[in-house]
Every structure is written in C-alpha cells, then in structure tokens.
Amino acid sequence: MITFAQQKFHIMAEKERYDTERMIMRARYAMSLIEDSWRGGNLSDMEREDFKKQIAELLQGMTTLLDSNTRLGQELADAKKDLDAARDDLSKANKKIGVLESEIKYLKGKQNASNRHRFGDKGEKNTSGTSKSKGRTKDEDENDYIENEGRNGNPSVQGDSTSSESTSAGSPATHAEKAPRDTSNRPDHYNTMHADVYVEHDCDLDALKAMGLTFLRYSRPIDQFDRISVIRQDRYKTAWVRDKDGKEFAIFIPKATDASSRPCIFANEHSYDRPRLVAHTSCTHSLLSDLAVNRFQYAMTSGREMTRMLNEKMHMAPQTIFNWLKWGAEELKGGLKHIKKKLLKHGTVVYCDETWVDVKVVEADGTVHYVKRYMWVIVNLTTKVCYYLYGNRKRETIEKFLGDFKGTLMTDAYAAYAFFSKLKKCTHVCCWAHARRIFVSALRDYKDEMARVFIDLIKLLYKVELENIFFHRTEQEVVRARKLEAIPILSQLLQKANELLKMSDSKKISISEKLHQALKYMTNNWQELYGYVNIGNVLIDNNASERAIRPFTNLRKNFGGFSSESGAKVAATYLTFVETCKLMKKTALDFFKGFFSMTSGGRSDYELIVQELLC
C-alpha cells in the first residue's frame, strides 16, 4: 500500500527529472553556441552576455534542484522513519490486543467455572457477629495447584501453620474460667421437657416390703423419652359374591367386633417396665438412634428437628439434643478401633479425600472466631468400611493416622498428598477423574476445542474399566487388560500432551491457559496417574471417597459450620458408621438401635458390639 508521502515524493521526483533534463538541454545548446562563436568568431558582445546570463540562470536552477533533491531525500528518510515507527507501534498494539484477548478469554473461562462451582450455593449460616475466617478452602488450594501447573509448592500443606489454624485441632478450645454453680437449692426434678404421651410407672411398695426394705420417701424420678414410629399394614379380606341377578363382584363388610381387641401393638409395653437409658441422657436407644439418623444421614438441622418435636407435642431445648448426641458419640468411639483395623488392612487399597469446614473457637480472652478445619474421609472398598477423621490440613494429621499401613493409596494429585509418593511402604496412585475435570473445564468454560482430544482418550480408559466390571475380571485379568488396551492409550495421551506443550512454548500454536494447566498437571503427575495400570485391585479414580465425602458437604451446607471442635468430632464419629453401613448394605438406624440397646443394657465391650453388628 502506497502512502500519501510516497505519492508526493514520486510526483516531485518526476517533476524534478523533467526540469533537470530541460536545463541540461538548454545548457548544452548554449555551450554549443559558445563553441561555434569561438570557432567562427561571429558572436557579438550582446549575444555573449545573453549566453552568460542563460548559463547563470541554468546554474542557479541546477543549484535549486540540487537543494530540492537534498530536501526531498531528507523528507523521504523522515517518512521511512515514521513508517517504521508506525509499523512498530502497530506490532506492539497487535501483541497487546492478543494478550488482552487471551486475558479476556481466561477471565471468561474462570468466571464460567466459578459460576458452575457456586451455582445454588445458599448457606444458612450468618457470621455477621463474628470475625470471618481467613483460612483457605481446599478448592482454592486445588485451583492454585492447577494454576501452578501441578507442581508442589504450597507451604500450608507441608506442615507450616497458618493464621486459620492457630488453635491445635487435637486439643479442645480454651474457654474462660467460670465460677462453680450452687446446686444446694436444686429441685428434685425439672419440668422443662414435656411429651404428648405421658406414662407413669409406680414402684411396687409391697414388693419392697416383702424384700425386708423400709420405704422412706420417693427419690428424684427418672424421665425416659422415646419416639415410636411404625408403618402399619392392614389387610382386608374381601369376599367375592354373586347377587340374586347372577352378577359377581367383590365386597368387604367389617365384623362387628371391638376395635380394641385387634392384635395391633404399636409398642412392647414390657420394654418400659424398667428404665433403659443411654448413659448420661434421658432418651432410649430408639430415640437417640432416630435423632442421629435424622441429623447425620438426612442432614436435618436442629431447627427442623425442634419443629418436628413440637408437632409431636414434645417440648425441649435444642442443646439437650446436642448433649444426647455427644454422649452417644462417646460410646461409639469405642467401636472406632474395629473400623480403623479393617480400614488399614495390609495389602488393600485406601481411597482418601478431604474437605474444609468452619469451626467456632473461643479463645482464653473470650473472643470468638471461626477457623478452617478439615474433614478427611478414608474408604476401603475391599473391607467395606469408611472412616471420617477430623483435623487440620497438615500432612501429619493423615500421616499419623495411616501409621505403618502397607498397601495402595488413591488420592488426587494436589500438594496435600505429595508426601504419599515418598512413602516406601505404600504405592501412591492418582485419580484420573481429577485430571479429566481440568480438560472438561478447558472445553466448557474456556471454549478450547483442542481439549476434546484428551477427553476422548480418557473416555477410552474408562471404557476399559467398564469392561473389567462387566466381565467380572479377576485382578490378574484386569492387569492384563490394562496393559493390552490402556497402555497404548496412555502413551498416546502423553505423546500428544508433550507435542502440544512444545508447540505452545515455541509460539507455534495458541492454547488456552486452562488447557496448558491441564497438560502440565497431567505430565507433572504422570508417574502417579500411570500407576493404576499395574495394580489389579485399584480403581482408575478416587470417586469412592468423593461419594463418601458428599454427605458431609451436605451437612456443611445445611449447618453452615460447627459451634465447637467437639461438635465436628461428634459428626465425624456418627458419619463413620453411617457411611460404613451404606458400604455394607445395612441400615444405619438398625445399627444404632442395636448398638445403643446393648450399651444401655450394660455392655461396654464396644469394639465387640460393632464387630457383631457389622459382621
């Protein structure tokens, strides 16, 4: 494209060339006349003066043209400089536009991912009266880990303490000292709790007299609360009849008997002859089991539980329910040893994941604030047990729990689990579902179609795993199938990832930042992602622990957090047995009823009770 300055220069150059040729012709003509005059000697003085004048004019014109030529040359050089500068500015502007477009694309993708993650997040907790926690959630740590291209470098999971973990997870929160209460005027009993159905059991004074005992007075009564919930089935035997006209039809006419004589018993009254309370509570094993299932399996908040109590004409304080659940958890803790023993059985596969929770801590000076704590979930599909471990995000928490475990550990590939790869006793493998999730985000949120190739290849890996399940293959057959079918797919994945990264680093191709993170995440953790191929009893992903952790995230969403670390530990205890019952295809309600029935009957061998109920 010819600029205006170039057009102007060409026009002036043509004009200059025409004037120069014309002056040269005139000068040559004048010189020839002078030579002729010198030879012939017939020029007059006037003609010579005229020729000299013309020659002077021509010389003056040549000087002017030379000056003009010099000026035009300088203008041309300046125009070239301006053109080069404009080209540089245009190149810089294009680069800046490219960077801004890339940033816009990245921010749009990040916004889409954030919207998908936060959609429907409607927490009920209001922390306006307390200081907010400055701790980081696992999702934030995972995003930083992915953006760090799968390299370990987060100091918060390597054992360093953070501001959100100033209080030790292993020790109770420090409370301000309170003055002892005066209990000298305590009444014989309280009337703070009332049930709709009231049954009073009197002591047999005649039996006491027969035993040689002297009755003095009634002592403080024992209140026992129970919830009776049954589903009734009534079967009506209809008669097939024929009327006088010969029409046949079915009919039912009830017998004229007293309704009270029907054999329908909603409760075994003999079970209420003597009080059988769960230790330190006023509830039966049935009521405590019902409260535990409602709260920790159905995620029912205390407000909804109190509404149900009021509908049943029962009046009590919410803190009473929390206290009952706490004492029940104290008895259940004795059975955790059996769960842990089965969980860490040598030679098996353990699936591990964790999530955050806000816990209220009361400092010694009385200040209240929330801190970030973590709930670890460990699942063993071989022995069909699940364990909830409450603590902080430091690796010592899970490292101490695992102890001398020898087997396979399946986790995600984030920095909190980096030390697993260094353990000599264990084989650490990583989850392919997490790797796939980043590619899906690159495709869905960042609109990078090049991620589809990797998603399709990972889909083929899952096809191999689906065939292993469908054909009921043994561990040896699973390893053989993976080596035959999965290894070529894995090799293709790694090759394409390295090629794409090389082209991206050399600026030969442009990919989204999310896809670049996904490729780096996969290549940097390739050894752990590849490790499942050689182990027949390990799955391709960590979805087992993610499914087990979902009930706790539902609790967190409904409750908003825990008012104490003791409450979080109580939740961990109950959830351990709820999720273990799910894996063993047993009902948690029946387990809790059986357990608390035995303990309220006097048994204290908790580990043996759990073993009997979950055998």
Image (spheres, rainbow, N blue to C red):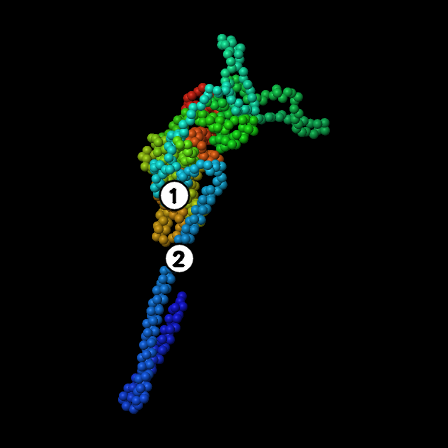
As drawn, is 545 to the left or to the right of 69? right
340 is higher (above) or lower (below) than 185: below
Q: Which quadrant holds residue 546?
A: top left
| Residue pictured at 39% horizontal, 57% vertical | 93
* C-beta proximity under 8 Å, tags 1 and 2: no
| Residue pictured at 38% horizontal, 33% vertical | 167
Where is residue 357? Give x, y as percent. 43, 35
Q: Quadrant of the C terminus?
A: top left
What number is the disc on residue 94? 2
Where is residue 549? Give x, y as percent. 44, 35
* Mark 2 Cα shell of 10 Å, populated few (<14), some (14-19), many (≥20): few
Residue 614 in view here: no
User: The residue under label 1 is which amino acid type?
Assistant: Asp
Residue at disc 1, secondary structure: helix
Identify which residue, 252 or 119, lies in the foreground. 119
What number is the disc on residue 561? none
Q: Quadrant of the N terminus?
A: bottom left
* Mark 1 Cα shell of 10 Å, populated few (<14), some (14-19), many (≥20): some
Residue at disc 2, secondary structure: helix
Residue marked by disc 1: 144
Q: Which quadrant holds residue 494?
A: top left
As drawn, is 267 to the left or to the right of 522? right
User: The residue under label 2 is which amino acid type?
Assistant: Asn
Measure the alpha-carbon separation of dots 1 and 2.
30 Å
Residue 155 in view here: yes
Number of labels in the image equals: 2
Where is residue 393? Give x, y as percent. 38, 36
Where is residue 599? Give x, y as percent. 45, 22
